[in-house]
Image: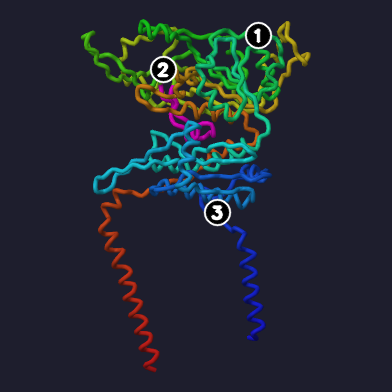
Amino acid sequence: MKPITLIGIWLAIIVANISLHRIVWRWDLTGDHRYTIAVETKRELQQLDDSLDVILCLNGTLNSGFHKLQNAALDLLHEFRTISPFVHVELCEEEQMCDMQKQLGQAGLEPVVVYEHSKNGRTSQTMLFPYAILRYHNKQTIVNLLQQNRTKSGEENLNHSIEGLEYSFVAAIHTLQKNETDRIAFLEGHGELTEEDVYDWSSSLSRFYQVDRGVLKDDADVLNGYKAIIIADPQLIFSDTDKYIIDQYLMQGGKIMWLVNGIKFSENMLSDSGITPVIPQDLHLTDLLFRYGVRIQPLLVQDLQCLRIPVDVSRDPGNPQYQPIPWTYAPLLLTSGESPVSHNVMQVSTLFASCLEAVGGDDGIQKQVLLTTSSASRVTGAPAEVNLSDLTVQKEAFHLQYLPVAASLEGQFTSLFAHRQKPEGLLSANASPIKHSVPTRQIVVASGNIARNEWQQGQPLPVGYDRYSRIQFGNRDFLTNAVLWLTDNSGLINLRQKNIALRLINNERVQSYSKTIQITSVLIPLILLFLTGTVVLWRRKNIYAQ
């Protein structure tokens, strides 16, 4: 071959390598599509018009699990860079950690302490910062990379954290790119939860929305500027005017989150005397919700999977002895993995909840259960009485399973006023009511207490936090995800349903077969080497013998 031809071939190879160096080629052959970037993600990244700086704070001395989380975050961010050249990734170094720690502390984010036990019995602890700081257009937000669920193992929590990385980053990017903040509103005027009662939930929502509060009056269009409204644990009757305003807001594409109890009780009477009557609660909303495809039953739910409360079991008043007793009226609700609202969300705590019933048959409304009781539940019809002095549990009475407590409704709804006259005295741009809605969404929860946060020493506790067990349940995540799902028109919330199969090593089998594995790992290479050498020598002998 001529030298000129060889030089041409080498030059072609060099040019091809340089040209293809910047192009990333990857075929995702995994069954769970773990390396496939969603269309919604690509759309958000392609809208970037300025530098997006991502500082990953998860660095330092990491165990294998957190190192896997770090690699997954870096791999995902590098994939983002192939879609948009504006994405810049930086791994926080040790000398930057002090400044980053101050920023995270100001945002109310604490380090995660990881305890590890070595084989020799020693225990070590490491402080980690599983966060990422995103900066874009002089705005900044912080992403929490770690999901913690006390019902899951450490490996499962890390796997769920990896599953949620794409949604966490893209949701933050979407928030940074928005020029206007959407508005949502808590309705007042019917004895709903006060601003202090929902302080923690409102604070969580304020990261994404402008949160307002207000009373319905006589303007039928008063809600039109809001992406969603929240009706949180009302105690007073809704008038026809109120129902008309809410109904017509829904018909025009508004989103509603209902937190409504089917029964009425008194926490003050329960704390003062240890007894409270339980009666059906009639807010005049039954016909409205029935038309939308759901009914809140006037039943009191009990569950063996519940919170525990300290009860004095001593017979001596001067020497109290408190023991945690199951409080079946405070069930821990199971979350559904079939909806992005409740996917990978921890159990949700509540008190004196009711249950839902789907109605309407084939009305075209997509109904999906979000929260249920456990496999050991029961219901008590109202009127009834709850007495703290009688906390005995008869397990055989808890024979009901998976009673629905929260559900999502999606589709085109029919107005309650399709065949009714408009209430008098209303100010409205429409002379007659809209009879059928555009496609829209609602969420109905048969519990108002699910959104209430307690206060301690003048400070609000996180919603879903149990003071006695010191466990944070999934109330805040569920409630915030619910509003995000209601207002999501881009499909970003569906990224929360990404599933990555967790393939764990069976440690018991590894230990039982450890000797066999070690011996096999040593002998098989030696045997293969011996056989290969024997064949080579035999072949060489035959060739040169001729």
Label 2 – label 3 distance at C-alpha: 53 Å
The crowd level at tag 3 (other Cα within 10 Å; few <14, some 14-19, many 20+) is few
**Residue for badge 3:** 28
Mark closest to the chain's N terminus, 2 or 3: 3
- Expressed as whole percent of the image width and height from the top left, the position of residue 164 reads 51, 40
Give residue 457's mark: 2
Q: Which amino acid does label 2 sit on?
A: Gln
Label 1 – label 2 distance at C-alpha: 41 Å
The crowd level at tag 2 (other Cα within 10 Å; few <14, some 14-19, many 20+) is few
- Expressed as whole percent of the image width and height from the top left, the position of residue 202 reads 54, 23
The answer to whether marks 3 and 1 mark residues whose Cβ atoms lie closer than 8 Å is: no
What stretch of residues is rendered in magenta? Answer: 331-349
Please state if 449 lies on the left or on the right of 213 as rendered: left
- Expressed as whole percent of the image width and height from the top left, the position of residue 321 reads 24, 15
Give residue 240's mark: 1
Q: What residue type is labelled 3?
A: Asp
